[in-house]
Amino acid sequence: MDIFCGCHQWQYSEKANNTQYDGPVTANALDLNGVQQAINTYLENGKYYLMDITQSMYNTTKNDGYILTLDAENTSTADLKYSQITSTNNSWTNKAAVSAHYNALHAYKYLKNTFNRNSINGGGGSIISFINVAEEDGASMENAFWNGKAAFYGNGGDYFKPLAGALDVSAHELGHGVIGNTANLEYEGQSGAINEAYADNFGSMAERKNWYIGEDVTKTTFIPTGRLRDMSDPHNGGSSLNDPGWQPKHMSEVYTGSSDNGGVHVNSGIVNYAYYLYATAVTREKAEKVFYRALTSYLNRFSQFIDLRQAIVQSATDLYGENSNEVTKANEAFDTVGIYKEEQTQPAESYPENPGQDYLLTYDVDPDNSNTLYRSSVLGTSFVALTTTLMKGKVSVTDEGNFAYFVSDNDRIKAVNLKTAAHEESEVSPDAMWDNVAISRDGKRLAAISTDIDTSIYVYDFEGQQWAQFYLYNPTTQENLKSGGVLFADAIEFDHTGEYIIFDSFNSFVSTTGDSINYWDIGLIHIWDSKADKFADGEIVKLYGSLPENVSIGNPVFSKNSPYIIAFDYWDEGTDEYDILGLNIENMTLNVIYENTTLGYPSFSKLDNKLAFNAYNMDDEQVVGVIGLGADKISASGEASILVDQAQWPVYYATGTRVLGFGPNANFTASYKSGKAPLSIQFSDLSENEPTAWQWTFPSGTPSSSTQQNPLVTYNTPGIYSVTLKVTNAYGNNSVTKTGYITVSNTTRVENIENKIMVYPNPVKDIR
């Protein structure tokens, strides 16, 4: 994949800046704010392009590591058609293009100079920006977003000026790419609010002139302050969520609804204010390094506010010492916003192993053998032929090992009985329209890909006897905005719960003037809501925020017992490199399991101590290989060997029955732990493993009990009180009592305390 048409690999030298030879040159041009900016461009065959290859990240061998600005030509990402932005004389009158191009360079330099980070992905990946992005109906887009591959800028309208005109907005969007390539914080609830706050952090620190976000593009007719957000005062001139631009600054104001992915753009204000307090106490230079270390070393996809506090305190300890002022001020900042230190619960790590006998299924590729699917021992012995039906891909097996589902060569979904001696074969769907299939581990739902390029995954619920069609998209960092580019999925597999499907998909963004952007990536889609017992909303998260140039990933599979462990194929079209990678999706630890010469289609063994995969032997014949796995399940142990000759598409399975679910672990926090009567406290559930019912007990509180997940309770009488929470789901229950958790004081006593703590609820004005 070569995004830049005609711009071939070129060795940079200083001489090029002063000649008309092909290569990098510089220009001066006005941006959207009327400021003259120095930008780097590229000359080829008498035409100049908005492409910068002069930074240290540029790789001449791979032609990667450039900064490129493109024109979306007023198309939306649902049907993106883009073109190069060019000039015949190196003069640039497109101010939006100049702003986007300059801002991308500034963001790159900020990351490089401050953290020694080599571009957005940390590996010298290119930085791509699109201007003139429109809504699907062609209207001007009043937004900017990151979709995992590039930053996209609309031209504004009633609420915003052209979005590319704000450096902090650009650094914010590109910051999402950094987040996606580090902790990869899930864009929902508290983890999503942390994600948004980090992006604001990058935006504010890259611009560095104030604590505002978007003040250069926000119209006062939309937000009276003219600021999209204010990190120094998240209320931003408002008094409630009904006021545009208002955010909470304390956990007593936290939003607990479902809109905005659980308030990711709302509750980020609490973290923003904590950062502001910390940075003004220890300097921006120290604060940004502490927060960056937390992002890259301690936070993970599911981190909550209490995890953030712990990560920041630990990072400050790492950098400045346990008893340092930097640690003290970190604790004070989080105390001030109501994010308190709590005992943390750990979710269950793994399911119990399947107690049944384990087997291996492989697909025979011997042209002289009419049998196709074989069952064997896990050692590759004692083969039993199961069918002669030709198949389009690997089989999918229920967790109990009863049936193997597949798509036949005539595009029909079929299943073979693995339990009976006759191995009866049945037709699940007579419609000749399918390309791939997967069965949930409990056998209740089936997912399929059609032969049409319809950008969909179809799911059938056997109990409700109903199909649902889920459309695929690239998620963005803006509410209700879904980016296109996805053409179709290929590999699909249910997670252990049956609520999510992991899939790979082919993406293509079409250029009107050159090569298109094409790549495969991996996503997770929510297809079933167990609490509501119905189809889910189809929300998608991508495994990685961005991928290097020419790199694709696909064929993902879950480990048999650990829901946070996956393996997948990696291939680099530029170098023809193939690898099988193992990933811990909780902490994003990645290892190479095997250096292959083809796509592996991996499969974990029953004990997760081996991985089988497609390979070629020394005679260039297809075989199934196997390699041992380490205790982490994502690294190799020992050397690979041939398991089955003349075969492909291995699938391990076992025939036992087990419970695939975890009981909940109770935990909670409160917006205040002390204060004067009457004291109103917002309690927040922090329980792990998805409880479905809550029973709170609040001695002397009003109410004294609650079944809400996040209740509001008022204490009218001074005293020291305990709080109990019992949580339940289909797999069990758990309770926790925090003794002496709430201290309610009389007015006189608390007034004395408030005289000592003046930064909340009314921050003193001389803090900078």
Image (cartoon, rainbow, N blue to C red):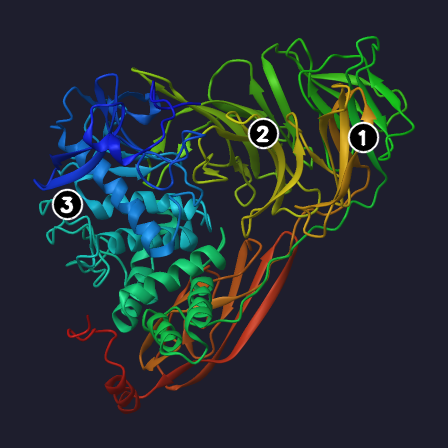
- For disc 1, the marked residue is 642
Work out whether 683 lies above or below 263.
below
Question: Residue 767, located in which quarter of the rendered image?
Answer: bottom left
Lateral position of residue 432 relative to residue 644, left or right: left
> What's under tag 3, amino acid-wise?
Thr
Which type of secondary structure does the marked residue at label 3 adopt?
Answer: loop
Q: CA distance from mark 1 to mark 3?
A: 62 Å
> How far across and how far down the image is residue 435, in percent?
60, 17
Q: Which mark is residue 218?
A: 3
Q: Nearer the viewer, residue 247 or 578?
A: 578
Question: Residue 347, located in which quarter of the rendered image?
Answer: bottom right
Residue drawn 85% across and 29% down?
419
Whichever of callouts 2 and 3 sits on the residue coming sooner in the sequence is 3
Q: Nearer the viewer, residue 764 or 685?
A: 764
> How far across and how far down the image is residue 750, in percent?
29, 87
- For disc 2, the marked residue is 577
